[in-house]
Amino acid sequence: MSEVMTPPPVLRYGQPGFFEAYAAAWGFKETLVAFYAPDGQYTDKASNVTVKGHDMLRRFMKVYLQFSPKCTVTFTNWIAGEKGFAAEWIWEGANDGPLRLHGQSSPQDGTPWRIDGISVCRVNDRGQILDHTDYWDSEHLIKTWKRV
C-alpha cells in the first residue's frame, strides 16, 4: 500500500489525469468534496449508506478516514462516456480505527486489507460528480476482522 502525503489537484471530469487525481482524493476529505457538485450524491451499496451534498459528504469522509486514515484507492480500469464513467478500483488500508458494518465492529488492530470494487458515476456539464455509486463485497472486509 502506497502512502499519499499531499492532496492531488482538483480536476474536472474530462481533464487529463482526472482518474488518478479523483482516486487519490479519497485520502483527503476537503479535496474529495471539491470533486462533487454542491448537490452531489455518494452511495455505498455495500454498507447501505447514501449521503447528499458537501456537508454530508464531509461527515461520511470523517468516518471513512477515522477507520483507515492512510487508505488508498487506485482505479485500475475505466470506461468513460460523455455524462459519466464506470471504474474498477482497489481500496487498500488497515483496520486502524472504529467502523461498524452489518452489526460487526472493526478490531482497530492495524490488520491490512485489500478490496476490489466498481464505481458508477454521473457528472454534470462542469465535470463535477453528481452521483457516485460504489459496489464492493463488505463481507470480504468483515472477514479481515475475524482473523485469529
Image (cartoon, helix red, strand yellow):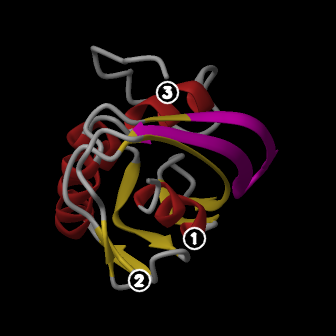
With 94 as the anchor, is 137 left or right in this view?
Answer: right
Q: Residue 14: which quarter of the image?
A: top right
Q: Quadrant of residue 112?
A: top left
Q: Earlier along the polypeptide chain: callout 2 or callout 3?
A: 3
The residue nearer to you, when weighing 13 against 50, is 50
Give whichever of 145, 73 is nearer the camera. Answer: 145
SS state under label 3: helix
Mark 2 lies on residue: 102
Q: Which residue is mark 1?
A: 139
Q: Secondary structure at mark 1?
A: helix
Disc nearer the start of the sequence (1/3): 3
Up the image or down, 5 lies above or below 55; here it is above
The part of the chain drawn in magenta is 74-93
- Which percent across, then down, holds residue 61? 26, 54
Which dot, 2 or 3, sits closer to the camera?
2
Seen from this angle, which residue lies furthest front? 148
Horizontal arrangement in the rendering, residue 20 relative to residue 52 (left or right): right
* Residue drawn 54% across the image and 46% down it: 127
**Relative image position of residue 133 (x, y in whole percent):** 57, 68
Q: Amino acid at mark 3?
A: Ala
Circle nearer the N terminus (1, 2): 2
Q: Position of residue 76 (x, y in %)?
A: 73, 33
* Residue in the image at 21% along x and 59% along y: 63
Q: Is residue 80 magenta?
A: yes
Per the model, the C-alpha gap separating discs 2 and 3 is: 31 Å
Q: Which residue bears the numbered disc 3?
A: 21
Task: Say how many tags the image has.
Answer: 3
Q: How crowded is the residue under tag 2: few (<14 C-alpha within 10 Å), some, or many (20+)? A: few
Q: Residue at x 29, y 54 (%)?
A: 64
> Do the CB atoms of the residues marked 1 and 2 lie less than 8 Å apart?
yes
Compared across the picture, whether 32 is left or right of 77 comes to left
